[in-house]
Image (cartoon, helix red, strand yellow):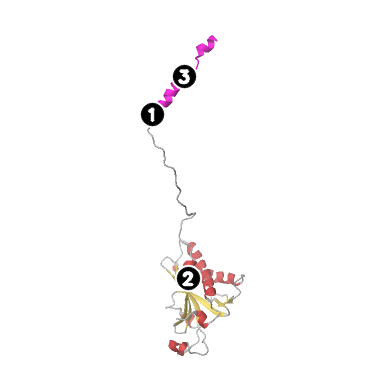
Amino acid sequence: MLEPSEINAQLTNDRIDAVGRLMVEAHSQVIDREEPYDTGWSIGCRSYTWRSRKIIEAAYSEGFEWLGIVDGSLRFIFSVGGTEVNMYRGTSEKPRKNILSRAVRYPELNQYGLFTDLEEVPDLVWSFALETGPEGEVVALQFVGLTDLGEVVALREVPIDEFQAPLVSVGHEEYKPVSLPPASLGIRKQPRKEAEESTDDSTDRDAPGEDAHNQE
């Protein structure tokens, strides 16, 4: 399997991963804000919108000069280094039909042995495929170059584990073991209550009485 950058020099791993990070962050934020009446459909729609808006916002930010917006509508198409890219929720093995309909037909791509011998690399459909798990979490994100038949010619596995925060409790801190001195143990010779009463009696005996004070 070829790397996208082997076909198109503008599609570098750093750029692909940078967009992938935006998508994973946006989708994770949607999952974190899930409402009681949400369904898979409503979450999917909101995730698509948030991912789109996240990419649009980044396209006008410093450091993303290579990122552009081709179509900001619900059809949403953006560009990486001038190459059009879209996205869908699913796996690379089952791309959406509307994604494939944009591909240009190149029957010779069905024979992968001929691909590296082509003098001119044909146009492919470049897309991010976001795969989610039972709870809606992102389990895989791939950047693929597809033919109109859905055959994957180039692929980049986006390292999503580097983008997702580990599951830890709020306020979690790492504590180091501390050496404490051994506790002193002993047997009390006299119960506390009796010791207090004994002390009070001795105090009363030592204090001068009212009669002695009056005699003075």
Q: Which residue is mark 1?
A: 191
Q: Secondary structure at mark 2?
A: loop
At label 1, the amino acid type is Pro
- Which of the image's four quarters has the C terminus? top right
Residue 33: give x, y in percent of width and height. 49, 62
Q: Is 195 covered by the magenta stretch?
A: yes
Q: Nearer the viewer, residue 206 or 59?
A: 206
Other-residue count near label 3 (Cα within 10 Å), few / some / many at <14 / 14–19 / ≥20: few
Residue 34: give x, y in percent of width and height. 47, 62
Dot 1 or dot 2: first in sequence order is 2
Q: Nearer the viewer, residue 76 or 108?
A: 108
Residue 23: give x, y in percent of width and height. 51, 70
Q: Which mark is residue 204?
A: 3
- The answer to whether residue 137 is above or below residue 181 is below
At label 3, the amino acid type is Asp
At label 2, the amino acid type is Pro
Q: Over which residues does the magenta segment extend?
A: 192-216
Q: Which mark is residue 44?
A: none
Q: Is 131 covered by the magenta stretch?
A: no
As measured in the structure, the alpha-carbon distance from the residue carrying label 3 to the one carrying label 2 is: 82 Å
- The answer to whether residue 102 is above or below residue 174 is below
Q: Which residue is mark 2?
A: 159
